[in-house]
Image (cartoon, helix red, strand yellow):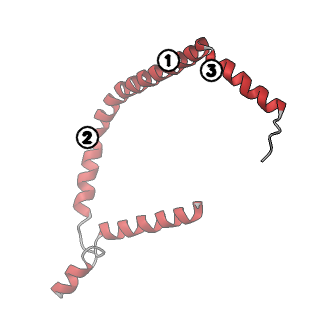
Amino acid sequence: MTNDRDPRLMALFESAAVVAEDNEFVTRVMADIDGARRRTVIGWIVAGLLLTPLVWWLSGPVTDTLVVVGELLPDSLFTIEQEMVAELLAPVNSVAGVAGLLFLGIWRLYRKLTH
């Protein structure tokens, strides 16, 4: 290692010491950050208040759709006479099983293509 020091680098360190001693600059930056944080919180609150009636209005049709889907999902795709085999294949012998396997396949393909 050498004791030679770059004068430009030393000038940067010296200017940083001057800025660190300037409390007005730090106070201004912190005030700007606090103001931005307050605006963000207020924005989220306003967005939540504006979206609440929309979500309430959509909750009825969404609930009805989920009830219909819930009634369809447990239906077996194939009738299996042997009880033991039927129990073993129950997770994949339904609309829900096929939908789950399809979702996992699409997810795996997406992950493989994006990474």
Query: Of residues 97 and 22, which is closer to you in this image?
Result: 22
Can you see residue 24?
A: yes
Query: Of residues 41 and 109, which is closer to you in this image?
Result: 41
Callout 3 amino acid: Ala
Marks 3,1: beta carbons within 8 A: no
- The answer to whether 88 is drawn above or below residue 67 in the figure is below
Comparing labels 3 and 1, the label whose residue is closer to the camera? 3
Tell me the SS state at disc 1: helix
Say the numbered circle drawn on residue 35.
1
Mark 2, other Cα within 10 Å: few <14 / some 14–19 / many ≥20: few
Please state the horizontal and vertical placement of residue 91, each as a whole percent of the image: 27, 73
- The C terminus - image quarter: bottom right
Say the numbered circle drawn on residue 60.
2
The residue that appears at 18% across and 88% down in the rendered structure is 82
Please state the horizontal and vertical placement of residue 86, each as a whole percent of the image: 21, 82
Residue lying farthest left? 83
Marks 3 and 1, how far apart in space? 22 Å
- The answer to whether 27 is drawn above or below residue 1 in the figure is above
Callout 1 amino acid: Gly
